[in-house]
C-alpha cells in the first residue's frame, strides 16, 4: 500500500472496513492452557521469581507477558514453550540479540484510529511508528536469520509466521521523518506545510522589521518602556509607557500587572499581523489533515501492528527467560511417567540433580557466596521422601527448591540443575512456614492442621505435596502419631510427597514402608555446622543441642539438657552421627580412589606413548636398512646384466630379474608388515584379545588376509587340510593355509592398518608403494613432456604392480599424438605389462590408454 500526504491520494476507509482490518478477537497476550489447580504460589515464592524474570524483559509488554505466565498441565504447551526458549538461548548465546524496546499495547491507540476522521496525537503516532519499526525489523530477522539460529529455530518461526504476510515497509516510509522528537510535525511532512511555514517566517521578519522601526522612533521621545518586541494574543506588540499610549497610534492588547506598561500593536503592523494569523490557521488545518492521513495509514495496518505486538511480547518474554537461563546455567527438564523409565535413566521418575534454588542463588551471588547444589531423586516405585537433619541445615530449602523447580518446569521455563526429570503434576500443594492467623483465631498448629486437611481431601496421584515440619508445634508424641498417619494417607493416595521432620517416628516409618525414602541434610561435627548437602537413603540427626551450643547458648544449660536425654535418644543420635561420619569418610575415600585412578591412567598412557615412540623409531631404522639392501642388490644386478655381451639374453635376464625382484620385494614387504603388526599387537593388551578371536580355521565365505599379497580374499573352497582356493578380485588362486595371516569376520582392517591405528606406525616398501585400497588406478600426464610423462608413468606402473592392481588407465590427451605414441611404445616393452589397448570413445578413446598388468 502506498501512502500520500495529499488528501486526494489517501484512500477513504470506512468504519466497517476498519473493523475488518482490525479484528477485535485478536488476543494480545496468550493465556496459559490447562493451568494447575493450585501452585502454592506464596509459599514457593512464585511471584518473586516472576519479578526476576520480568526485570530481564526489554519492553513493558514483554514484562506483562512474563507476569501472566502460569504453570500448566498441558504437556504439548510446555514443550512448545521450552523449545522456544531453547531456540532463543541460541540467539542470545551466539552473540545475537534483538531490541524489543518500544513494544507496547497498541489497543487503545488503534481503537482511536478506527474512528472515522479522527487524528492521533503526534506522540501516539511516534509510538505507533516505533512499534511498526520493531515489527518490521523482527520480520526481516525471520527472513534472514543470524547464523547462530539459521535453520535451528522452528518454534520461533512458527510463532512469528503470521507476520510474514504483513509488509510494513510502505507504512514506515510514509511515517518516518514527519514527526520531530518534541511531538511537532516536521516541515517535510508535506510540501504545503513547508510552503506555509516559509511564508510565516517571511511574515515574522516583515512584522519584526516594522516594529523595530516603530520602537526606534518611540524610544527617541522616551515613550517606550523597553526596546523589545513581544506577543499578546498571537499578535506582535511593543511595550509603551501608560502615559504615552494615546500618542502611539494602534490597538492596545493589554497592560502589565503594575499598570505602568501597555502593549500596543501599531497601525502599520495590523494588516501584517492579520496575515500571520491567517497563515497560522492554514498551518493548523494542514497539520490536522496530515495527522488524519497518518492516522488512516496506521488504522489500515492495525491488524499487523496488533499481531506484531503480541508476537514480539512473547518473543521478548522468551529472551528474558533465555537470559535468566544463561545466567543460572539452567537445563531443559524432561517429563516422564513410570512407563517411560528404564535402567538407562537410572530408574528415576522424579530427579533434580545438582538443583539450586534460583532466588537463593541470586541473593548469594550478590554476597559473593556460593550455593550448595541439592540432588533430590525418587527411584522408580518411590513416592515419598522424608527429609530430616539439623536446624538451619537446608531442609526447608530442599522443599522449596523441589516445589519451585517443578513450577518452573511446567511453566515452560528451564530449571537451574545439572539434570531434571519430573512427573507431570496437575497441582502442587505446600504447607510451609508459620500459618497462624489471629484474625481467624488459629494457632500455628491449628493453621497447619486446617491446611493439611484441605490438601488431604484433594491431593491425588498427580499432585505434589510439600509438608514442612509435619507434626510440630504440639505434644511430640501426639504430633509424631499424627505425622505418621498423614504420611501414610498421602502414600495410600500415591501422591508425590516431600516431608521435612525432626521426629524419629517418621524416620522409622520411612524405613518400614515401601515407596518411602529417607534423606538427610548433612552436619559437620567438627565445625558443629550444617553442610547443606542432601544425602539420600539415610535419616539425619537433628543435632539441636550441638547447634544450640554453636549459637552460644550457656554451656551449663546445654550440659543440663544432655543430662535430660534418655539413653535411647542418646544412642539413636550417636548412631546417626556415626553413620553420617562413615558416609563422609566413604565419600572422601571414593574421591581419593578416583584421583589415584586418574593418576594411574595418566602414567599408563605416558608409558604406552613412550613405548610406541621407541617402537616407531626401531621400525623406521629397519625400513631404512631394508631399502638400502634392496637398492644395493638391484644396483649389483644391473651391473651384472650390463656385463653380458648378448643384448637379447641381457634384456631377457633384466626382464625376468625385474619380475622376480618385484615379487620378492612384495613378499618381503608383506612379511615385514605382518611382523611389525604382530609385534605391535603383542604389546597391546586390547589387540591380543582381537588377535585371539581371529586365530581360527578359515571356512568357505570367510574373508582372509594373505601374507604373500598383503590383500584380502574370500575363501571359495577348502581343497584339503593344507590348501585353500581363494578369490582375490576377479582372480582365483590356490594358497597354502600357512599363507593366511588372519580371518577377517566383518571389518576389513589389515595388520598394518591396525598398527597405524594403535601406534601410529608407518610401514612402506622401498618404492613407497601403497596397498591397492589406498591407490588410484589412473594417472593423468596431460601437459607433461614425453620424458616427464614416461618417468611418471614408469613409477606409477611399479607402484600399481606392487599393490597388485590388475590394470591401470593412463590419461595423456589427444594433441599431436606424440605423447600417446611415446607412452604406448614404452608400455609395450615394460616387463610388468601384459597388454596395451585403446579404450572405447566414451571412455577416452585416443586420449587414454588401458594397461593390463601381470599378476
Image (cartoon, helix red, strand yellow):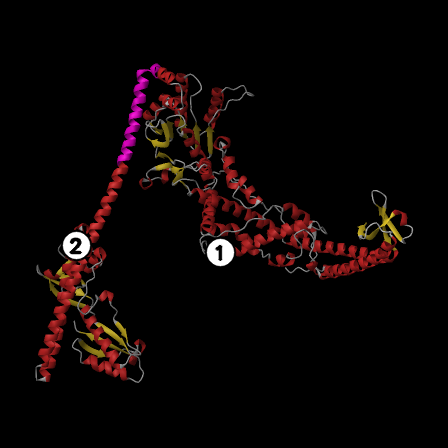
In the drawing, does residue 736 fall left or right of residue 363? left
Secondary structure under badge 1?
loop
- Mark 1 — residue? 145
Label 1, label 2: how many angstroms apart (C-alpha)?
A: 53 Å
Residue 410 in the image, given as x and y percentages of width and height:
46, 39
Image spot of residue 636 (x, y percent): 10, 75
Between 270 and 785, the one lying in front of the other is 270
Q: Is residue 181 toward the left or the right of residue 366 in the image?
A: right
The residue depicted at 29 percent of the width and 27 percent of the height is: 579
Q: Is residue 403 positioned above or below 199 on the image?
A: above
Q: Is residue 580 magenta?
A: yes
The quarter holding residue 31 reads top right
Task: Say which quarter of the image contains residue 718.
Answer: bottom left
Which residue is at 91% across, 52% downward? 247
225 falls in the magenta region = no
Q: Which residues are magenta?
A: 562-589
N-term mark: 1 or 2 = 1
Residue 240 image position (x, y, % from top left): 86, 50
Up/down of 617 relative to 398, above or below: below
Where residue 529 is drawn, which disc sits there?
none
Vertical position of residue 826 compared to residue 337: above or below:
below
**Magenta segment, prevailing SS (helix, strand or loop):** helix
- Residue 246 x/y as whole percent: 91, 50
Q: Please give the label number shown on residue 681.
A: 2
Depicted 208 relative to depicted 805: above or below:
above
Residue at 27% x, 32% y is 585
The number of discs equals 2
Q: Regarding mark 2 in the picture, which secondary structure is present there?
A: helix
Instruction: Pick whichever, 466 or 727, lies toward us.
Output: 466
Residue 99 in view in this figure: yes
Amino acid at each position: 500500500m502506498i501512502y500520500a500526504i495529499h488528501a486526494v491520494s489517501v484512500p477513504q476507509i470506512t468504519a466497517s472496513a476498519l473493523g475488518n482490518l482490525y479484528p477485535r478477537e485478536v488476543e494480545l497476550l496468550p493465556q496459559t492452557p490447562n493451568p494447575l489447580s493450585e501452585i502454592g504460589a506464596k509459599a514457593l515464592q512464585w511471584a518473586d521469581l516472576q519479578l526476576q524474570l520480568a526485570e530481564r524483559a526489554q519492553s513493558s509488554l514483554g514484562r506483562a507477558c512474563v507476569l501472566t505466565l502460569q504453570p500448566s498441565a498441558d504437556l504439548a504447551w510446555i514443550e512448545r514453550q521450552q523449545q522456544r526458549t531453547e531456540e532463543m538461548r541460541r540467539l542470545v548465546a551466539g552473540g545475537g540479540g534483538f531490541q524489543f524496546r518500544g513494544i507496547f499495547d497498541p489497543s487503545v491507540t488503534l481503537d482511536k484510529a478506527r474512528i472515522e476522521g479522527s487524528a492521533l496525537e503526534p506522540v501516539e503516532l511516534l509510538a505507533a511508528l516505533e512499534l511498526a519499526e520493531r515489527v518490521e525489523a523482527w520480520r526481516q530477522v525471520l527472513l534472514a536469520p543470524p547464523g547462530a539460529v539459521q535453520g535451528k529455530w522452528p518454534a520461533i518461526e512458527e510463532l512469528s509466521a503470521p507476520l510474514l504476510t504483513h509488509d510494513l515497509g510502505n507504512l514506515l516510509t510514509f511515517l518516518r521523518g514527519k514527526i520531530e522528537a518534541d511531538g511537532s510535525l516536521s516541515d517535510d511532512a508535506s510540501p504545503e506545510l513547508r510552503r506555509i511555514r516559509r511564508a510565516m517566517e517571511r511574515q515574522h521578519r516583515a512584522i519584526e522589521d516594522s516594529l523595530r522601526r516603530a520602537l526606534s522612533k518611540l524610544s527617541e521621545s522616551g515613550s517606550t518602556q523597553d526596546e523589545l518586541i513581544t506577543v499578546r494574543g498571537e499578535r506582535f506588540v511593543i511595550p509603551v509607557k501608560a502615559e504615552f499610549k494615546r500618542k502611539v497610534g494602534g490597538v492596545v492588547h493589554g497592560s502589565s500587572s503594575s499598570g505602568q506598561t501597555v502593549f500596543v500593536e501599531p497601525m502599520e503592523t495590523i494588516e501584517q499581523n492579520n496575515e500571520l494569523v491567517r497563515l497560522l490557521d492554514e498551518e493548523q488545518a494542514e497539520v490536522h489533515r496530515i495527522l488524519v492521513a497518518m492516522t488512516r495509514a496506521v488504522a489500515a495496518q492495525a491488524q499487523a501492528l496488533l499481531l506484531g505486538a503480541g508476537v514480539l511480547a512473547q518473543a521478548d518474554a522468551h529472551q528474558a527467560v533465555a537470559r535468566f537461563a544463561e545466567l543460572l546455567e539452567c537445563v531443559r527438564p524432561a517429563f516422564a511417567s513410570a512407563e517411560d523409565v528404564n535402567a538407562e535413566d537410572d530408574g528415576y521418575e522424579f530427579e533434580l540433580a545438582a538443583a539450586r534454588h534460583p532466588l537463593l542463588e541470586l541473593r548469594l551471588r550478590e554476597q559473593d557466596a556460593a550455593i550448595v547444589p541439592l540432588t533430590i531423586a525418587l527411584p522408580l516405585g518411590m513416592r515419598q521422601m522424608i527429609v530430616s537433619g539439623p536446624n538451619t541445615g537446608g531442609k526447608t530449602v530442599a522443599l522449596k527448591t523441589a516445589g519451585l523447580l517443578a513450577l518452573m518446569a511446567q511453566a515452560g521455563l528451564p530449571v537451574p540443575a545439572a539434570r531434571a526429570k519430573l512427573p507431570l503434576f496437575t497441582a502442587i500443594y505446600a504447607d510451609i512456614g508459620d500459618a497462624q492467623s489471629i484474625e481467624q483465631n488459629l494457632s500455628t498448629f491449628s493453621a497447619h492442621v486446617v491446611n493439611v486437611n484441605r490438601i488431604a481431601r484433594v491431593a491425588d496421584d498427580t499432585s505434589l505435596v510439600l509438608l514442612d515440619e509435619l507434626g510440630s508445634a504440639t505434644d511430640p508424641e501426639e504430633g509424631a502419631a499424627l505425622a505418621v498417619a498423614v504420611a501414610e494417607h498421602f502414600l495410600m493416595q500415591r501422591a508425590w510427597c516431600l516431608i521435612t521432620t525432626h521426629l524419629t517416628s517418621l524416620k522409622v516409618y520411612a524405613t518400614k514402608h515401601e515407596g518411602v525414602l529417607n534423606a538427610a541434610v548433612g552436619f559437620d561435627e567438627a565445625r558443629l555446622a550444617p553442610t547443606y548437602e542432601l544425602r539420600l537413603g539415610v535419616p539425619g540427626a537433628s543435632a539441636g543441642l550441638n547447634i544450640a551450643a554453636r549459637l552460644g547458648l550457656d554451656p551449663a544449660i546445654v550440659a543440663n539438657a544432655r543430662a535430660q536425654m534418655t539413653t535411647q535418644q542418646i544412642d539413636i543420635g550417636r548412631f546417626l552421627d556415626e553413620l553420617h561420619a562413615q558416609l563422609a569418610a566413604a565419600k572422601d575415600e571414593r574421591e581419593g580412589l578416583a584421583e589415584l585412578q586418574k593418576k594411574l591412567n595418566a602414567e599408563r598412557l605416558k608409558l604406552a606413548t613412550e613405548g610406541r615412540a621407541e617402537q616407531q623409531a626401531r621400525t623406521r631404522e629397519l625400513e631404512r636398512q631394508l631399502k638400502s639392501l634392496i637398492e644395493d642388490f638391484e644396483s649389483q644386478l644391473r651391473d651384472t646384466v650390463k656385463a653380458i655381451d648378448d643384448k637379447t639374453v641381457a634384456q631377457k635376464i633384466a626382464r625376468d630379474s625385474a619380475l622376480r625382484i618385484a615379487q620378492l620385494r612384495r613378499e618381503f614387504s608383506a612379511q615385514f608388515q605382518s611382523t611389525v603388526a604382530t609385534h605391535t599387537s603383542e604389546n597391546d593388551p586390547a589387540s591380543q584379545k582381537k588377535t585371539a578371536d581371529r586365530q581360527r580355521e578359515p571356512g568357505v565365505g570367510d574373508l582372509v588376509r594373505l601374507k604373500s599379497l598383503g590383500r584380502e580374499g574370500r575363501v571359495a573352497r577348502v581343497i584339503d587340510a593344507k590348501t585353500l582356493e581363494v578369490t582375490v578380485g576377479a582372480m582365483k588362486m590356490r594358497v597354502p593355509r600357512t599363507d593366511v595371516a588372519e580371518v577377517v569376520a566383518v571389518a576389513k582392517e589389515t595388520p598394518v592398518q591396525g598398527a597405524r591405528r594403535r601406534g601410529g606406525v608407518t610401514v612402506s616398501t622401498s618404492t613407497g608403494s601403497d596397498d591397492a585400497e589406498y591407490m588410484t588406478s589412473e594417472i593423468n600426464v596431460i601437459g607433461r613432456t614425453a620424458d616427464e610423462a614416461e618417468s611418471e608413468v614408469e613409477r606409477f606402473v611399479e607402484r600399481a604392480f606392487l599393490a597388485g592392481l590388475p590394470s591401470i588407465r593412463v590419461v595423456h590427451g589427444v594433441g599431436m599424438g606424440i605423447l600417446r605414441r611415446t607412452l604406448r611404445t614404452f608400455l609395450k616393452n615394460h616387463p610388468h605389462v601384459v597388454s596395451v589397448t585403446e579404450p572405447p570413445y566414451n571412455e577416452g578413446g585416443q586420449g587414454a590408454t588401458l594397461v593390463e598388468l601381470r599378476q
